[in-house]
Image: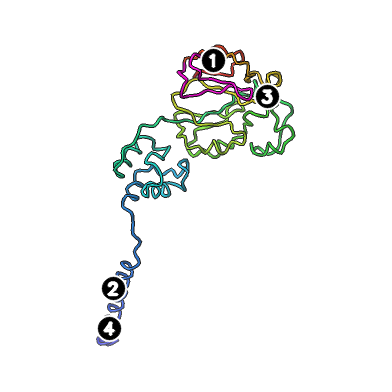
Amino acid sequence: MSVTAIIIATIVVGGTGLFIGVFLGIAGKKFAVEVDEKEVAVRECLPGNNCGGCGFPGCDGLAAAIAKGEAPVGSCPVGGTPVANKIAVIMGQEVQETDRKVAFVKCQGTCEKAKRQFTYTGVQDCSMMGFVPGGGPKQCNFGCRGYGNCVDTCPFDAIHIVNGVAVVDKESCKACGKCVSACPKHLIELIPYEQQVKVVCNNGDKGKAVMGACDVGCIGCKKCVKTCEHEAITVEGNIAHIDYSKCTNCGKCQEACPRGAIVLK
């Protein structure tokens, strides 16, 4: 190959590269997508779990919503107050201290305490119990099925089945709410982390039926209501309910409960 041919080839390749570079540079500026610097900064503050507990499609979705003013700065249940404070600085806002929440399972019908009506060997799925005669093997049709739908959905390994009932690890729970949505019996709720007194029953049947189904079920006797000095506990639908905003964790209702359906821990 002659020197002239090499020079021509070099010029052609170089010219082509230069043209492509200039073209891409112009196209990049013309079609560039504007990036919200606040959105990027907010996203960097979020933990990146993408659990969906905030109600948005992952951390990217939440960051965009916060940057647009469509979500509060404290919307991330995993990050809590520390993350909310960082985001508040970025958004030029003040953040209010929020109480830490934790998931709580309203059932203590373990294998020993909950009566069984038959032995079940089918699909191990809580949601499938609606298709099983009697609602499942446990005689109480309001309690935990114990097949772990909540366990499967928890991204933090904070809930496990222990002796037939779902139990939450308070320290690992981030209150994302996924287990709340996963439970077909609506047994799980988010309560204040500091709350110690809890009604551990969800059975809405009358007393006699409850006693026949579980050794620790609430029978709606209202002894807890009569002993509470703060009007923090009521009985509705045959079952006790605690108003956590009024409860002082004194434990008097727990002492008065003849069935052990109220715990202090």
- The mark closer to the camera, 1 or 4, is 1
C-alpha distance separating marks 1 and 2: 77 Å
Q: For numbered disc 2, what is the local secondary structure?
A: helix
Label disc, if present, on residue 205 of the rendered structure: 3
The secondary structure that most of the magenta stretch takes on is loop
C-alpha distance separating marks 3 and 4: 93 Å
Seen from the viewer's position, the closer of residues 65 and 153 is: 65
- The mark closer to the camera, 3 or 4, is 3
Q: Does the magenta stretch include residue 32?
A: no
C-alpha distance separating marks 2 and 4: 24 Å
Q: For numbered disc 4, what is the local secondary structure?
A: helix
The residue that appears at 46% across and 18% down in the rendered structure is 249
Question: The magenta stretch spans which residues?
Answer: 227-249
Mark 3 or mark 4: which comes first in sequence? 4
Label disc, if present, on residue 22 of the rendered structure: 2
Quadrant the N terminus occupies: bottom left
Mark 3 or mark 2: which comes first in sequence? 2
C-alpha distance separating marks 1 and 4: 93 Å
Using residue 253 as the reference point, say whether residue 50 is left or right of it: left
Question: Whole-percent x and y of residue 206?
Answer: 68, 21
Label disc, if present, on residue 6 of the rendered structure: 4
Q: Residues within 10 Å of mark 1 (few under 14, many from 20)?
A: many
Against 245, residue 50 (above or below) is below
Question: Whole-percent x and y of residue 149?
Answer: 59, 37
Q: For numbered disc 1, what is the local secondary structure?
A: helix
C-alpha distance separating marks 1 and 3: 20 Å
- The mark closer to the camera, 1 or 3, is 3
The residue that appears at 50% across and 24% down in the rendered structure is 243
Q: Does the magenta stretch include residue 245?
A: yes
Mark 1 or mark 2: which comes first in sequence? 2
